[in-house]
Image: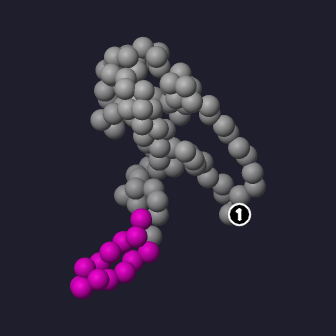
Amino acid sequence: MKKSNLHGVEILESSGNIYADLGIEDAAKLKIKSDLVIQIMKAMKRLSLTQDQAAKRMGVSQPKVSGMIRGDFSNLSERKLMDCLARLGFNIEIRVRPAKQAVGQLVVLA
């Protein structure tokens, strides 16, 4: 994280992963999940689906959709979130390529 100072106020530039910036365990996994949930929310809006309608299409309960929208997706795996997107009419593509660093990363591109 890059630090700078503006008018006596310390500014920390984000790494692009708020979970990592906050020192939360499993930050990469949480970032992927949150990116997938954002895409689900966009799909629901684009399709004008209520939580109940979206839940039926995705094969989950309405309370899970409500929790997901509120940021509680700890009980949903990345695979389940990808399945939800597929059920909302999206193709999921997984591309594997060599990383520039010693350890690669997972990224959701939309």
Q: Could you say which quadrant of the image residue 22 lies in?
A: bottom left
Quarter of the image for residue 49 reads top left
Measured as percent of width and height from the top left, residue 37 is found at 43, 36
Which residue is denoted by mark 1 in the rendering?
Answer: 100
In the image, what residue occupies the spot 62% across and 34% down?
Answer: 92
Q: Quadrant of the C terminus?
A: top right
| Residue at the extreme bottom | 7
Relative vertical location of residue 85 with respect to residue 60 in this rendering, above or below:
below
The residue range painted magenta reads: 2-14
| Quadrant of the drawing holding the N terminus | bottom left
Residue 69 lies, with reference to residue 110, above or below; the image says above
Q: Nearer the viewer, residue 22 or 8?
A: 8
Q: Was residue 5 drawn as part of the magenta stretch in this picture? A: yes
User: Could you tell me residue 28's position as x and y percent?
Assistant: 51, 49
Q: How many numbered marks, from 0 up?
A: 1
Residue 104 in view of the camera: yes
Q: Secondary structure at mark 1?
A: loop
Question: For the point 32% across and 83% down, which residue is it?
Answer: 5
The percent position of residue 109, horizontal first and vertical second, equals: 57, 47
